[in-house]
Amino acid sequence: MIITEITEDKIKPFSSPDSNTDDTGAELVFNGRVRNREEGDEIIALEYEHYEGMAERELNLLARKTIKEFPVHDLFCRHRVGKVPVGEVVLHVVIRSKHRAEGLEAMAWFISELKKQVPIWKWAILPDGSKRPSQCQSE
Amino acid sequence: MKDTLLIKVRCFSQVKYALEKDKLTITLPVGSTTGDLENTIRQMAKNKLDRIHLRVAVNQTYIDQPVLLKDGDEVALIPPVQGG
């Protein structure tokens, strides 16, 4: 199963049932959080903007590609947009697979591709309230 | 028959910052390509986008090679994305 969502709301984790299939041995959860520095400068938040419509489609397309390329059962992803204060979760991904190895590999690939394909950008919000496009291109 | 195209341009991140706009409409001659549009936008930005690689999306789909534009197309010049 695939669920992808881009939301302005605070991220709520996907529920984790005890067993959705007898063949699932690994459940990986990734939470990406906003750090307090950007290019060496202190920040109070990041503001994420997205290309509405295209970002949702690209995210779902990427999830479908991941399920096709890797032997994983489920991929759930929530990406927050708008202003996200330091410390809060901006990206939440759950992958379920038979064994951990393929799940870990799928998780790394999915997040790496998300950072190349999905039209989402971040602006650094500085302590004085001003904002500038983030220069961060880190993997 | 019209001899110009009206193109809707969406601006994000560094493009928005350089142009100080998130949307604009540009008139180009019939026969213009996405490459022509990119050149126009880069000129409007007065060198602020010189070192920034821009991908192009036409009607919300990435394209890898320049294509002819059609009247009413929505084009985004996409700076490196930064999700996650």
Image: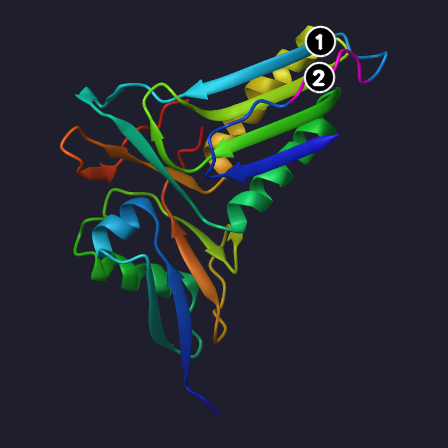
Q: Could you say where residue A21 lies in the image, as x and y percent from the top left?
A: 83, 16
Same subunit, tags 2 and 1: yes
List the residue tagged with mark 1.
A26
User: Is A93 located above or below residue B24 in the figure?
Assistant: above
- Depth check, front residue: B9 or A8: A8
Mark 2 near mark 1, Cβ–Cβ under 8 Å?
A: yes
Q: Which residues are magenta?
A: A15-20
For the stretch drawn in magenta, the main secondary structure is loop
* Type of the residue with mark 1: Ala
Quadrant of image for the C terminus of chain B: top left
Image coordinates of residue A112 in percent, x first then y, are: 50, 25
Q: Looking at the image, is mark 2 or mark 1 earlier in the sequence?
A: 1
Q: Position of residue A110 (x, y in %)?
A: 58, 26
Image side of residue A22 versus residue A106, left or right: right
Colouring convention used in this rendered image of the protein? rainbow
* Residue A121, label in figure: none
- Residue B68, magenta (yes or no): no
